[in-house]
Image: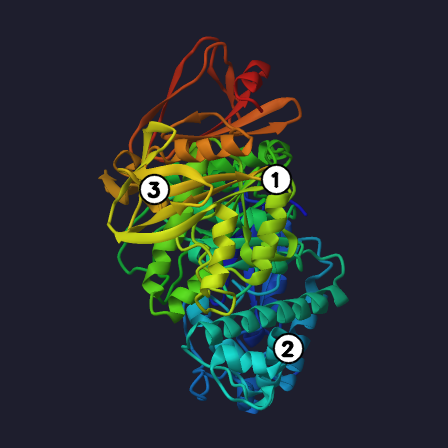
Amino acid sequence: MNYIFGIEYYRPPNPPRENWEEDLRQIAACGFNTIRCWLYWRTTERAAGRWDFSDYDQLFELAARNNLRVLVTLIAEAPPAWALRKHPDAILVRPDGTREPIQDNCGMVSVGGYPGFCLDEPQAKALAARFITAAAKRYGAHPALAGFALQNEVMPFYGMAQNQTPVNHPCQQPLFQEFLRRRYRTIARYNAIHQTTLSDFTGAQMRAAALPPDGLDRIQFCAERVIAQLQWRRDLVKSVAPNAPTFCHAAGGKTSVLNPPWIQEDIAGLVDGWGTSNYENDYWSHLLVATVTRSAAQGKPWGIVEMTGGSMWRHYPTSTRSPEELVSLPLTFIALGATTNLFWQYRPERVGSESPNFGLVLENGRLPKRSQAVARLAKALRQHRSLFTELRWPQPKIALVVDWHGFACEEGNGAASQSAARIEELAGINGALAMAGFEAGALSSAHWEKHGAPAGVKLLVMPGNVVLTDAMLDRLDVDLANGVSVLVGPMFGHYTGDGWLRTQAQFVRIEKIFGAARCDFTVEDSPRFTLATNKKIIVTGSQFWEEYELLGATPWLRNGQVICGTRYRANGSVRFRVGSFLGHKFFGGISTAVSGGVVNTQTNAATGNPLLPALLTSAAKAAGFAPEHPTQPPFVVRIGQHGRQGVAFIRNTTGKPQTFRFGSHLRAVSALDGAAILARNAATLRFAPQETRVFLLNATALKLYRV
């Protein structure tokens, strides 16, 4: 697949045709190589069997004329009005049995018809298949085609709160009951877990806002339907356009990549390229989104399919990004190996919640300063394309295990508001690992359960994994026996895979793994913990902390004389247990600094958990490995290798200017403009707030930075 650095362009009815020719000329002149369009079923088959692709034909023609490629997003979730009238019983159904209202004009589907049909319903599925096949056949061999995005943001399966309607249609009830048969095997086991007295699975019904057993059933069934429907779409496209690349991407930001009703690795395995939208506002969130998305792709091309070039979803501008921030945004993902970066969008929307400030250009077509900076980046990337698409990165030795089961249990147990804190926990741990110089990966708990720790990983980090299936515990035993170490957070494995609190006997198994037992807990907003082996390392927890009784383990963290973190070495692995959430205190809170009317996010780690990177480094050292990248807080430094040359991505993570200190005898050259930035013995370079710079490093630098 080719490198994509482009922009969202045509989402009917915006922009109007009279702008296309000049816009595409300007987009190409700015250095972009790809535009993305939304190809709606609703606008191409206005009458049954009568296709009209004239708008898209013209768009492809203009794109080809300007050496631009087109990424086509196929939107089957907006059926034509005639189809909705003819097949009303195929419309999605809410949990209360009523039909999902058809939206005539919403931000993402201005042409109406959303969210449309249940695509498990046979008649609707056949009609949608006809649309997908017709579109893929028409453009599948077009020389300007970049590929087909099989749907937008896995619509309408957005997240935990939105996963009820897409799986509640009557035609899906037999599918759900068959799923339950496979999941529980016997009706007796189902009854015991759900506290029911059914005689067989035909009496089992999908439940809406329910306690964890039912909620977990719904989410896992939803994950199955996502995979089945995506595979159906892919097979339709490949049947008529076998050589056309296929894409799929998740929605919005870290909530969507951490808390979806699907398994990301499974989706990524079905398509040629995987990605996500990203509308987060701070670097640490961008970094977490990139880490999870890259890892889910499992070596396939990946990237960001939507990222904002302006303020979002407001009538009056409420925030914006400086030119340095906007340039740093795609560089954050390129610095982890992304080969797709698409800005949302070129022209702002003309109606709805995404109007009028959601674009790289203003309403009059002019490029503001921030967009001019992006254009300069696009041209530099085009000039040095191989440098940024052929980088090699160290193999991660540390991986976050992301567990959607825990979010589901929080939702079912009335603690959904705490899910945001758990997400920040992951962002903080991942950010601290980056600040400490580690090449970190991530994987879903479901993928880990099936396949174990990825090759080369020596330490699994599980900060919020409160749910463990029996198979996960078995997998943990196998990984530990293979020398993989583990670091877990509070309430680890409290719930079984069915959403029930473990029995006393089941807790004994976890206590034996870690050589320690949870014996009490204390509620405290910002408890302080000291590393037992180095009292200079003090970290801050949040919300509460657990106290442990040693059963063979040694103290790792203390609150005064109380043991609230343990370390246990057994069978070639080290098992760390931490009694509080440490991650989101790493930020010290995300705040804003206003300068010249520009709002910049900034991190105040000095008042949060500045020594969390040191604590994680201590755990890694015990597990037998060291950081792969240099460290210089508050900068994050990542170094990839291109042939014999090093390429350094250096990010100022704060909202204030900062000075980066290079080692002596280093000559660095800007990778974007070729200028010699530092001569021999030059020591410092000033960075603007949130700025990322990219340097080519000589052989001496490679030795200095351990590439």
Q: Is residue 339 visible in this depiction of the protein?
A: yes
Residue 100, image x and y in percent? 45, 82
Mark 1 and mark 3: Cα distance apart in space = 26 Å
**Which one is earlier in the sequence, the residue at label 2 or at label 1?**
2
* Foreground label between 1 and 3: 3
Residue 262, image x and y in percent? 55, 64
Question: For numbered disc 3, what is the local secondary structure?
Answer: strand
Mark 2 and mark 1: Cα distance apart in space = 34 Å
Q: Quadrant of residue 52?
A: bottom right
Q: Quadrant of residue 683?
A: top left
Q: For the point 49% across and 9% down, which residue is it?
A: 665
Please rate how many residues cluster around mark 2, counting C-alpha atoms within 10 Å: few if below 14, some from 14 to 19, many from 20.
Answer: few
- On residue 483, which mark appears? 1
- On residue 61, which mark appears? none
| Residue sitting nearer the eye, 59 or 653 | 653
Residue 29, image x and y in percent? 53, 41
Please rate how many residues cluster around mark 1, counting C-alpha atoms within 10 Å: few if below 14, some from 14 to 19, many from 20.
Answer: some
Question: For numbered disc 2, what is the local secondary structure?
Answer: loop
Specify the quadrant that holds the C terminus: top right
Question: For numbered disc 1, what is the local secondary structure?
Answer: loop
Please rate how many residues cluster around mark 3, counting C-alpha atoms within 10 Å: few if below 14, some from 14 to 19, many from 20.
Answer: many
Q: How many marks?
A: 3
Residue corresponding to mark 2: 185
| Residue sitting nearer the eye, 364 or 133 | 133
What amino acid type should be assigned to the residue bearing mark 2? Arg
Q: For the point 60% across and 50% down, which residue is it?
A: 477
- On residue 563, which mark appears? 3
What amino acid type should be assigned to the residue bearing mark 1? Gly
Q: Is residue 266 above or below residue 480?
A: below
